[in-house]
Image: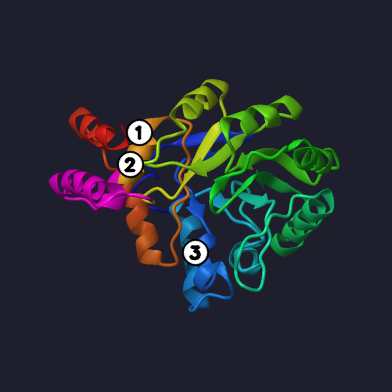
Amino acid sequence: MNTASTPLPGGTWNLGDLPVTRFGYGAMQLAGPGVMGPPADQDEALAVLREAVELGITHIDTSDAYGPRITNQLIHKALHPYPDALRIVTKVGATRDAQGAWPPARRPEDLRRAVRDNLESLGVDALDVVNLRLGDATGPQPEPLAEAFGTLVELQREGLIRHLGVSNATAQQVAEAQAIAPIVCVQNMYNLAHRYDDDLIDRLAAQGIAYVPFFPLGGFSPLQSSALSAVAARLEATPMAVALAWLLQRSANILLIPGTSSVAHLRQNAAGAGLALSSEDLAELDQIGR
């Protein structure tokens, strides 16, 4: 399946019994501005998805709330019938309103509707992995998750979901979910500057559970950007390449899902993530998050 001239960086990891490439693709940016409406260039969006598969990527992250429905429809149009090795991970727990906000949608009826919508738009009989989104744009919310996560467990027992995960979750919420049913991944904000989940990542790695960081460059101060840029300049690489490579070297259970709406940028990300960072590079970068 992999027709790229060089192998994808990072090797593979398992989401439950589903092996995926650690370098994946996040489809969020395929929708229009504000993750609303269709892309400006649909042909390029379809080409990005096809290029991801050609590169050997077997992990695509999406949500029916992107667009809404737009990214799932593009995935279906570009890739269906899906390659046997391809795994599509989606999330539920939020919807979209007319202003482009992300109001929570975690009632049982909301979640059942969202799972049905994902099944329909992706054109599959069962979803590989469904993450329950527990927070909003401000971060994780400390609300009870038993009813919402229990609803997904019921849908899993009905054969509509293969594996479960949580997104934008606190360490306590991760533990609460695990007390209800096994999870295969946690998707939270994490990068060089925002390392609040360091302990959680290590704990999940020991359990064989994937950690999927979003915003790999989000939230950097000018000083931190200067430090990252200095390492990048020394390695003749981009800051994004260094940040992605650092994440892959941080822990074997970290899966990357950088997003882009450009084929050229997708190729650049895949090549950059394979950058080898020395112990000196790692020590210098490590100071950003301390």
Q: Which residues are magenta?
A: 219-242
Residue sitting at 59 percent across and 39 percent down? 169
Residue 199 as seen in the image, left or right of residue 172: left
Residue sitting at 35 percent across and 65 percent down? 264
**In whole angstroms, how far apart are the C-alphas of marks 2 and 3?**
21 Å
Q: Does residue 100 sit above or below 271 in this rendering?
A: below
Judged from the image, the secondary structure of the residue bearing numbered disc 1 is helix
- Residue 94, how many percent across, how many down? 67, 56
Residue 260 position by quadrant: bottom left
Q: Does residue 23 sit above or below 176 in this rendering?
A: below
Give the residue pinned by disc 3: 29
Residue sitting at 53 percent across and 59 percent down? 27
How many residues crowd around disc 3 within 10 Å: few (fewer than 14), some, or many (20 or more)?
many
Disc ID at residue 245? 2
Judged from the image, the secondary structure of the residue bearing numbered disc 3 is helix
Q: Are marks 1 and 2 in contact (CB under 8 Å)?
A: yes
Give amino acid for label 2.
Ala
**In whole angstroms, how far apart are the C-alphas of marks 1 and 3?**
25 Å
Q: Earlier in the sequence, mark 1 or mark 3?
A: 3
Q: From this viewpoint, which residue is outermost toward the left?
A: 234
**Per the image, is 222 magenta?**
yes
Q: Nearer the viewer, mark 2 or mark 3?
A: 3
Disc ID at residue 249? 1
